Image (tube, helix red, strand yellow):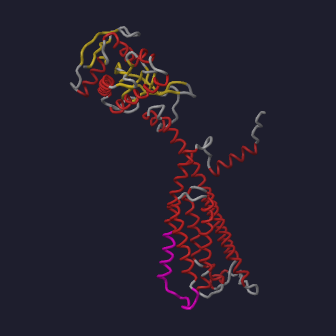
């Protein structure tokens, strides 16, 4: 059955939702990202617990230090409420260290938080033996906004809405208690001066408080939902980049992700760099004696060793081609010693693979061809599929040298350009031996070729 087209109203609703709450992550958020966010939220709940503990200790300290105007024989409801809240806060903080508190516990604890605060405010008129309207002017009401703001630490708007909703219901209940506690005298006034200078209540002022709580709750919930969506998108991008770096060299990933503009086909730059081609000697014979699973496992071990050597000298493995590798220097990362580092890499590869075995005692000796020159570094392909590589005539020369090792029984071949560039930065670190001159296809002049002892 064909999928019905999206209606204009549905598209408009989605557009409005994206405008208000931010665009949602594309596709389904993977479980591993959800788990990472949930783990961060569990840590945030511990932080919330510590802040609330600090808050109740601060309230208690202020109460103990403040002058006592209530009668000594009056019921001490304030310290009772503070003590109850302190016990509840400590218990929840201890539980949050032991387990990830489920949603129903968190929702219930938010109601308890607000309920205890409202109970504390309500107790003021008993403590100080005043009419019930007395507590409506208590500055302690401002702590409601702290309780709502604390819930923003979890990056989940549900808890903010729960805290704000509980605060609105709680405050409306306190106002209703004042109005209904003495039906013969609801103590309602329309005079603002009388409201400020007496125990009368002004309904408009209480409505303003409720509206303020609602607006703060809404704005925080929207901000947190936008932040959560942005965090999810950023986490997915980070995970994608991390996964991508397993298929594309890390240097290339960083180059792409930090580019000022999106990489397009043909984007590149011409620069002097060094290219190293590698190939395993007698690989066809080796592969004939292995099962496909053994072959893949052996190659993985081989590439793992090669990767460590290449990384040691600042190279970038741009491509894997069967058993061959294309390694570049001074392409993605600036490297003034690119020629010398390429030779160091080839020399270490020769030493590693001449003594180390893989699988069932298999030697995988590696031949290397190195050339230095001007080449193009950049993206090649279509808009849908790109590879970041190097290309040019100098690259073809390096590939030709790698194959030339077969004819001369060598494992490293470099051009005179690479030799000269390496001598400029590394001096006499390497010993070169002239092997031959070769005319590479597409060139008319011969290329001098050396091996490194």
Q: Position of residue 134 (x, y in %)?
A: 63, 83
On the picture, is 316 further left or further right than 344?
Answer: right
- Number of marks present in the image shown: 0
Q: Quadrant of residue 167?
A: bottom right
Residue 209: which quarter of the image? bottom right
Say above or below: 222 vs 88: above
- Is residue 120 one of those drawn in magenta? no
Q: Is residue 271 rendered to the left or right of residue 38?
A: left
Q: Nearer the viewer, residue 281 or 191?
A: 281
Residue 66 falls within the magenta-colored stretch: yes
Question: Residue 196, image x and y in percent?
Answer: 63, 82
Residue lying at the far left in this picture: please name it.
428
Which residue lies at the image location 47% right of the left edge and 82% below the top edge? 65
Q: Position of residue 311 (x, y in %)?
A: 36, 32
In the picture, the quarter occupied by the C terminus is top left
Q: Residue at image x 72%, y 47%?
A: 13
Q: Is 382 drawn above or below residue 85 in the view shown? A: above
Magenta residues span 53-75
Q: Nearer the viewer, residue 423 or 295?
A: 295
Nearer to me, 351 or 221: 351
Image position, residue 271 (x, y; %): 38, 26
Quarter of the image with the N terminus in it = top right
Query: From the viewer's perspective, is 403 left or right of 166?
Result: left
């Amino acid at each position: 059955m064909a999928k019905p087209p999206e209606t204009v109203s549905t598209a408009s609703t989605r557009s409005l939702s994206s405008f208000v709450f931010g665009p949602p992550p594309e596709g389904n958020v993977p479980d591993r990202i959800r788990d990472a966010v949930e783990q961060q939220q569990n840590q945030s709940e511990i932080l919330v617990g510590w802040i609330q503990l600090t808050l109740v200790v601060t309230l208690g300290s202020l109460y103990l230090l403040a002058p006592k105007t209530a009668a000594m024989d009056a019921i001490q409801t304030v310290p009772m409420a503070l003590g109850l809240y302190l016990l509840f806060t400590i218990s929840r903080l201890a539980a949050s260290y032991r387990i990830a508190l489920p949603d129903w516990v968190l929702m219930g604890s938010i109601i308890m938080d607000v309920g205890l605060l409202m109970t504390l405010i309500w107790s003021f008129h008993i403590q100080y033996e005043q009419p019930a309207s007395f507590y409506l002017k208590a500055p302690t009401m401002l702590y409601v906004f702290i309780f709502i703001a604390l819930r923003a630490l979890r990056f989940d708007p549900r808890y903010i809405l729960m805290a704000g909703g509980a605060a609105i219901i709680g405050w409306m209940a306190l106002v209703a208690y004042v109005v209904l506690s003495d039906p013969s005298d609801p103590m309602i006034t329309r005079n603002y001066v009388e409201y400020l200078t007496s125990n009368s209540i002004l309904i408009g002022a209480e409505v303003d408080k409720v509206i303020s709580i609602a607006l703060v709750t809404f704005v925080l919930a929207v901000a947190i939902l936008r932040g959560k969506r942005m965090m999810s998108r950023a986490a997915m991008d980070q995970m994608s980049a991390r996964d991508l770096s397993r298929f594309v060299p890390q240097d290339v990933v960083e180059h792409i992700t930090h580019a000022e503009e999106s990489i397009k086909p043909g984007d590149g730059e011409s620069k002097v760099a060094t290219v190293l081609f590698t190939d395993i000697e007698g690989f066809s014979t080796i592969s004939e004696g292995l099962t496909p699973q053994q072959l893949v496992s052996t190659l993985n071990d081989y590439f793992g060793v090669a990767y460590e050597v290449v990384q040691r000298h600042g190279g970038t493995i741009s491509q894997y081609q069967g058993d061959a590798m294309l390694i570049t220097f001074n392409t993605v990362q600036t490297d003034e010693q690119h020629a010398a580092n390429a030779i160091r890499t080839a020399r270490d590869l020769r030493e590693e693979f001449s003594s180390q075995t893989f699988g069932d005692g298999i030697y995988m000796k590696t031949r290397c061809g190195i050339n230095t020159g001007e080449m193009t570094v950049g993206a090649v392909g279509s808009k849908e599929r790109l590879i970041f590589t190097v290309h040019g005539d100098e690259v073809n020369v390096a590939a030709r040298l790698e194959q030339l090792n077969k004819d001369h029984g060598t494992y490293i071949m470099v051009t005179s350009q690479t030799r000269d560039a390496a001598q400029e930065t590394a001096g006499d670190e390497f010993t070169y031996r002239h092997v031959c001159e070769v005319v590479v296809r597409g060139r008319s002049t011969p290329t001098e070729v050396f091996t490194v002892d």
